[in-house]
Image: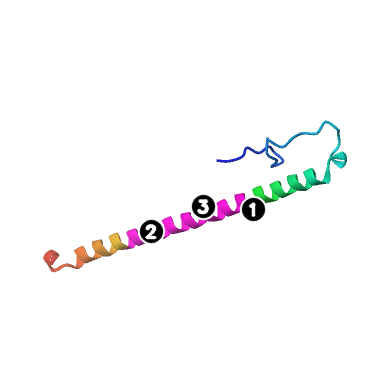
Amino acid sequence: MGHSFSETNEPDSTPVLAEGPREQEDPIVRLDRALQRISFALDKKKQSQERQGLEVQELAANVDALISRVRDALAQTDSPEDK
């Protein structure tokens, strides 16, 4: 599936600095982590939207099939063979 993320959406491969609080971290490292979290959130949102789009398409196909079956059933009941 890709990178494994912790609860804070940070990749496991991100180096952990032994200096202590985040305020002492290199600003470039902090910016990189923030960009990774943003990228992860955007990817997750995009996947969710794509999944919803597929669900809507599947639902529409099922409704179309149901309509077709109902029409066939109605056509059979209206056929002159039954009268």
Provide the secondary structure element on which disc 1 rests.
Answer: helix
Provide the secondary structure element on which disc 2 rests.
Answer: helix
> Which color scheme is applied?
rainbow
Report the span colored magenta.
42-67
Q: CA distance from mark 3 to mark 2?
A: 15 Å
Q: Main secondary structure of the magenta part?
A: helix
Of discs 3 and 2, which sits in the foreground?
Answer: 3
Point out which mark residue 14 bears: none
Q: Position of residue 26 (x, y in %)?
A: 83, 42
- Residue 75 picture quarter: bottom left
Of discs 3 and 1, which sits in the foreground?
Answer: 1
Q: Is residue 56 magenta?
A: yes
For marks 2 and 1, the one nearer the N-term is 1
Above or below for 75 versus 39: below
Q: Position of residue 63 (x, y in %)?
A: 38, 60
Which amino acid type corresponds to the residue marked 3 in the rendered image? Arg
Which amino acid type corresponds to the residue marked 2 in the rendered image? Ala
User: In the rendered image, which residue does mark 2 sit on?
Assistant: 61
- Residue 8 picture quarter: top right
The residue lying at 33 percent from left, 63 percent from top is: 67
User: In the rendered image, which residue does mark 1 sit on?
Assistant: 42
User: In the rendered image, which residue does mark 3 sit on?
Assistant: 51
Which amino acid type corresponds to the residue marked 1 in the rendered image? Leu
In the image: residue 80, left or right of residue 51: left
